[in-house]
Amino acid sequence: MSVNRLHGGLVDHETAVNFSFNGKDYQGQVGDTLASALMANGVRLMGRSFKYHRPRGVMTAGSEEPNALVEVRTGGRQEPNTRATTVELFDGLTARSQNHIGSLKYDLLAVNDLFPAFLSAGFYYKTFMWPRAFWEKLYEPAIRRAAGLGSVSFEDDPDVYDKGFLHCDLLVIGAGPAGLMAALTAGRAGARVILAEEDFLLGGRLIAETNCVGELSGAEWTAAMQAELASMDTVRIMPRTTVFGAYDHGVYGAVERVSDHLAVPEAGKPRQILWRVYCKRAIVCAGALERPIAFQNNDRPGVIMAGAVRAYANRWAATPAQEVVVFANSDEGHQTAKDLIAKGLCVPAVIDTRADAPDMAGIEVLKGAQIINTKGCHGVTAVKVRLASGQTRTIKCGAVANSGGWNPNLGLTCHQRGRPVWDEAIHAFVPGSDLPVGQSVAGAANGVMSTHGALATGVAAAMAALGDLGITAAAPDLPEAEDGPVTLSPFWHVAGAKRAWVDFQNDVTVKDVKLAHQEGFRSVEHLKRYTTLGMATDQGKTSNVTGLAVMAEMTGKLIPETGTTIFRPPYVPVAMGTLAGRSVGKAFHPTRLTPSHHWAAEQGAQFVEVGNWLRAQYFPKKGDTDWRQTVEREVLSTRASVGVCDVTTLGKIDVQGTDAAEFLNKIYANGFAKLAVGKVRYGVMLREDGIAYDDGTAARLAEKHFVVTTTTANAVTVYRNMEFARQCLFPDMDVQLISTTEAWAQYAVAGPNARKLLRKLVDAGHDISNEAFPFMACGEITICGGLRARLFRISFSGELAYEIAVPTRYGDALMRRLMEEGEEFNVTPYGTEALGVMRIEKGHAVAAELNGTTTAANLGMGRMVSKSKDSIGSTLSERDGLNDADDLRLVGLKPVHTGEVVAGAHLMNATGPIDAKHDQGYVTSAAYSPSLETSVGLGFLRDGGNRMGETLRMVNPLEDQDVLVEVVSAHFVDPEGGRLRA
Amino acid sequence: MLINHPLLGPRDASEFTYLGDANLLNRPDWQGENAVEAFHDYLYLRDNPAGLHRELWFHEQGDRSWLVVTRNTLTHEILGVEMARDVARNNKRFEGDAQ
């Protein structure tokens, strides 16, 4: 049996569990936490402190633990900064201490401890001020290395994290006496109840103390309650579940650690689940957290909260040492001594700060005494006590059970700016009246410190919540239980201590708080930031109130006058992986594939992400030397014969209704009311501020039926804005909208042979000759023997071109058929690169030109904005500043001699200074034009419409580019548009 | 947050897209006097109240309704939810009566 293992408790003494700590193998029992198992094995030193690298051991028995932070597991499952007090032991668990260089026992950074003055409150602000240049190179890397708590493996986590949603009438947070009674009351009334408990066992303090409930021990009573609750269909018991946040409208966040207690999750099970709980009412039964008394060297391993010492002894059958002195300011000390004696341990003395502390049979009670120092290198070996008489005495011991009273666990009550109030009766903050809507608090969390009080207030809170919900309930009979008063006499810290720790995780001492006060940081918020008190991962659960008490003492005020302490979510740290859930890697966002994607992949296409879509970028062929040659081939081949491009990703919005044409008149800057049935028109949309934001086409398929296309990137925004216009601005119009982007697969068929190719697919009876189906015609047709399709004679490439749409499920087949039938024309599939080159050659604007700063006038489309009608943005497009004579105009650019046009470069006059003041414009798009065999670009040029033929300097000082360019028409290819109309 | 959709009941706020002040319903008359100024004020001048705020939410991951939500910006309490189209129609009728 391990050196500090006791008998009894709730661990399975028959079943051993093997684990290792810092490379050494140990045995624990089923039911142990890492902390209790290490304690049972006599390991007190578990880590090093953050700033001074002081040796530290476990201080609590719960998630409030500030000291015993360890790194558990290895490889992809490695997890830093895990509290040893909440790690359930499993066979094969490996754990390591953190925050030291060299071994845990002989940490090289412990040298910090020799120079505490150097690292006192505000040391960042004071020390690293000068010289400035040292900050990045010296100070910051050194501090980061020294302050880093755990480490990560940089391997992918092999486990899955899930997200889930739960709904209930009543969420009960915490399954101690109050929570169990609340859940029972509501469960018996048939309400839908979720009982969430952070621990892997229910019971709270009932399984840590020796008090009886009725005739049963705390553990037995808990088991009986759990059995009844488990038998109710409407009650869901969730152990290992921490409710970490209280959000608006009864929404709570919770993490269920489904598999943390296993080496590997069971097949199909996630590691953790992030739950979003929607509840009508919530009762916080989160208990209370014990606070330490601060004294000289109170951070030595072995100085542990008295309640934790009882929990380890009673529940986990473990003790930090065989000889434990008790230091307390209430009867908690006596209770602790009693429990330890019952376990066969030695309690050399109870040191009680109260001069009138009661006596105890068989144990020496040192009344009015205080611990003034501790001894021991890596753990306590003795304490030095100042007796009431003023004499000092040294007492040998291996541990100190320390109790300064209990603070109600306020976390969730503060998450919506609720401010706790001071309760003079129990000398602690209790929840204020400004709780989150629908939340109430019962038991010790509400300052009711006895077991009887917890049971009774649990019932009362549940009855009240059920009453609000109109559910009739009967109050269960209350069992007999401990109902003692709070006996503590406030005592915060032992005077005269050189270094007495308040915040153990951030290494803040009583002296630091005093220093902050001395230097003028007296408000609680300033105190916090200056000393970092309460700003560690434990949010000061064990330190905030003590810090306040010290500050109150300095200012001569009462604690409630000094300030209060509130908490923000999350109650305990939540892993990033849990918050991410399954949204990692490729699943970070959905991937949208076009219907011809698999066909394109078969052709070896390269894909590019366009929003969530994957689009074919280019189609490399055998013999192509590089991507650029591939693109040139696609362009030349399309312009010479025929090419096909998947344009399914363009947004498509179906607009129907008697006011459909009038509605489009409002949406587009140019007019649509007079568009004939069977015709398509290019349209530009403005924002209400007059800036152009999207362009596309609207095809009138019937009198009351249009199909609008948008750019791929703006499909969602345009649809949203159109719904806004329909519902909010023009609510009386008879018009309906629906997005049909996913419903239709659409292909551009472009090139001189486009019609010949389509003729082979379009069913007889549909005349697509130039006369019957001219440029900008559209119609509903059938192809391939009866398949319904839509044909639009529109061109982005500048060639004779069509876009043909078929229902999505025929997209793949249509692409294959086009390739088959097009073989005789040497048909070429082309991707977004070739599409981009051809549109630049043709001077068509895309997002680079519609960049959120440009107007229709800038784009050379000023005359399109109708002044004879109201459309969104039309009024403000006329405002000052958007209509200056020398405004930017879209122009074409090409090098005069050599060099390339580069997107992003700026335009300067051929002579004159090159600076921002003399800026003439900028390049938005550039490409090598295989048709013109030169580099070409589009850009915005001041007064560009009147500067054709002028030579400018295109400069990019960042990359030393300086090229002479000529201003030309943006329509490089076929400016008259003869090809379009062929 | 939960928004009590008039047609669909309580829905999680994550299903919605937020726009802003419901005053955006009151788009000025393009032929009115000082239309440019009126549009400027309509577009750029918003109240930013600490307290009750009527604002536009779009049920983008749902039925695509635009809603007018009356929310207390201090507490996030939601005091009313209306279909924006109904509100817009009523506004127009009111304007019509006034003329």
Image: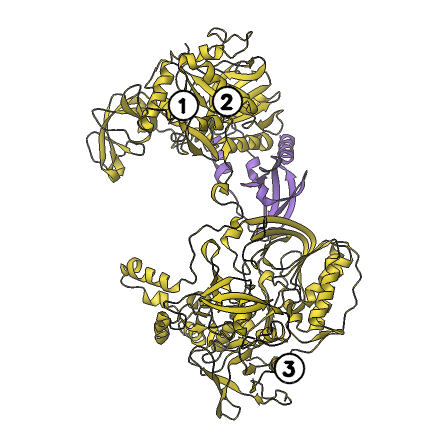
Chain colours: A yellow, B purple
Which x, y percent locates residue A863? 41, 21
**x, y (%) of residue A416?**
58, 57
- According to the picture, the residue beneath numbered tag 3 turns out to be A342
Q: Position of residue A341 (x, y in %)?
A: 62, 83
Residue under numbered circle 1 = A830
* Disc number lying in front (3 or 2): 3
Mark 1 and mark 3: Cα distance apart in space: 84 Å
> Which numbered disc, 3 or 2, marks the residue that appears first in the sequence?
3
Q: Say whether residue A546 is left or right of residue A964.
A: right
Q: Position of residue A135 (x, y in %)?
A: 30, 60
Q: Is residue A880 visible?
A: yes
* Left or right of residue A606: residue A130: left
Instruction: Choose the circle earlier in sequence order: 1 or 2.
Output: 2
Q: Is residue A133 above or below residue A389?
A: above
> Residue at the location (52% across, 47% down)?
B48
Q: Quadrant of residue A981?
A: top left
Please state the chain letter of the residue tagged with numbered disc 3 in the rendered image. Answer: A
Pick the front one: A198 or A270: A270
- Residue nearest the observer in this picture, A438 or A860: A438
Q: Quadrant of residue A340?
A: bottom right
Asked if badge 3 and badge 2 are on a common chain, one would say yes
